[in-house]
Amino acid sequence: MKILVKLGDLFGAERLIPIESAHISGVSYKTIGDAVEFLEALAEAGAKSKVRSTMNPAGIDYSNLEEMVRLPELHERQMRIIEIYKGMGITPILTCTPYYIRKPRENAHLAWAESSTVIYANSVLHSWTNREGGPSALAAALIGKTPNYGVHNPENRQANILVKVEADLRDYADFGALGIHVGKILRDETPCFEGLPGSEETCLKHLGAALASSGMTSLFYPCVSCPKSSDHLEKISVDPDDLKEAFESLSTTNESPDMIYFGCPHCSFEELRQIALKIRGRRVKDDVKLWVCTSRHVRRRAEDYVRVIEAAGGKVISDTCAVVTWLKEIGIDVLMTNSAKTAYYAPTMNKVETVFRSLDQCIEAACKE
Ligand code: F3S
């Protein structure tokens, strides 16, 4: 209650409002470290979630241990964190795409952490959630309520800047580069994008995840839902040079990668399908790891595609991702990805070099002739 009241006071909320669900970040031992003592104290005091609550990815995929860091003490500590959350009634879906398992209702109030999940919920699913941190999402789960400020109020959900896209977007990576560029320019404005080539949900997922990485945005409008009259809005435009510059900023080296990575945010069924179709009949190079991260739920649904990817020598990993697991410790120095969010964070979070490329270029780099 103290966390929620303090937050409400800080942002001028008048009351707490009930939430439909909470999504908790701060699950990977790599990212929360010794904050586990705080969780233990809550659990010992009998904390229990009041609403449907789910967990973001952890640091280990226990069903693919041969791919993971080989330090038993990290495995044990990670498992302890998951057990504590489970004891509080939080479901271990261990994914940042909980909406592929169950979509929240339109206009439902939520308390979700994980910025890519938040921006997708607000912009694509039309649910209402502030960008919670791990502790405030957990507090909201335990109380079943959140303070009524920010995008829980309709007046704060208006678009206030028009982004004219004058560059060609052909690949998920292009949407990610656009998000990184615009996120850096915006403060906490809500952008409306004009000129997007359609509104395929996976493209919007990559755009949103990137926007929320380089900036503080938690809501955007794709062209189809832009306000009818945008004359009063501030305007910016994005041209091909801007996109090229964003692309270049996301690569720190030209060296050959030792890991090719798809799945930030966790892959959709459609992404697994595309990867499988492109890799069918090919073979991953012996000195390269190919990781495709997704939720266990999507993995099960797409098992035919999983089989194709694994037959080619790739690994379909669940419950974790490249950013929240230990990469250096498994020998990765150079990571190639089509995810702008991973390329943005991995140099600092994982201390690896990055190469940011399209899906096709990543597949080419992963496979033998
Ligand atoms: Fe998800 Fe990991 Fe990216 S939690 S959004 S795959 S950094």
Image: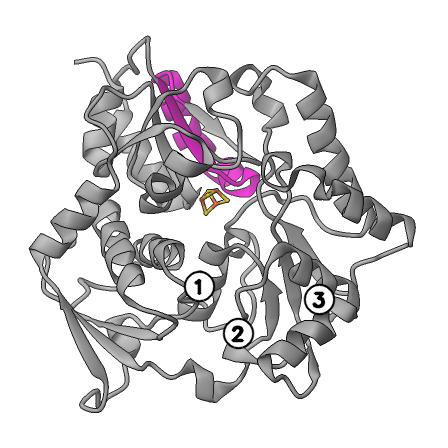
Mark in front: 2 vs 3: 3
Name the residue: 48% across, 65% down: 121
Q: What residue type is labelled 3?
A: Ala
Given residues 358 and 25, the one toward you in this image is 25
| Residue 128 point in image, percent of width and height | 53, 74
Q: Mark 1 points at which residue?
A: 119
* Quadrant placement of the C terminus: top left
Q: In this view, does 297 lie above or below 194?
A: above
- Which of the 4 quarters of the picture holds residue 51? bottom right
Q: Element type at marker 1?
A: helix
Q: Is mark 2 on a helix, strand or loop?
A: loop
Residue named by callout 3: 140
Tell me which residue sits at (70%, 73%) in the image: 6
Above or below for 352 versus 155: above
Residue 308 in magenta? yes
Mark closest to the chain's N terminus, 1 or 2: 1
The magenta-colored residue range is 289-314
Mark 1 sits near ligand 1, with its Cβ under 8 Å away: no
The image quadrant of residue 220 is bottom left
Q: Which of marks 1 and 3 is nearer the N terminus?
A: 1
Q: Can residue 215 be seen in this view?
A: yes
**Disc 3 crowd, CA 10 A, few/some/many (<14, 14-19, 20+):** many
Q: How would you rate the neighbour count of disc 2 (Cα within 10 Å): few for under 14, some for 14-19, many for 20 or more?
A: many
Q: Where is residue 77 in the image (x, y as percent from the top left)?
A: 73, 29
Q: In which quarter of the image is the N terminus?
A: bottom right
Q: In this view, does 116 lie to the left or right of 214?
A: right
Residue for badge 2 = 128
Q: Marks 3 and 2: in contact by CB < 8 Å?
A: no
The three-letter amino acid code for the residue at tag 2 is Trp
Q: Residue at x 33, y 81 (%)?
A: 159
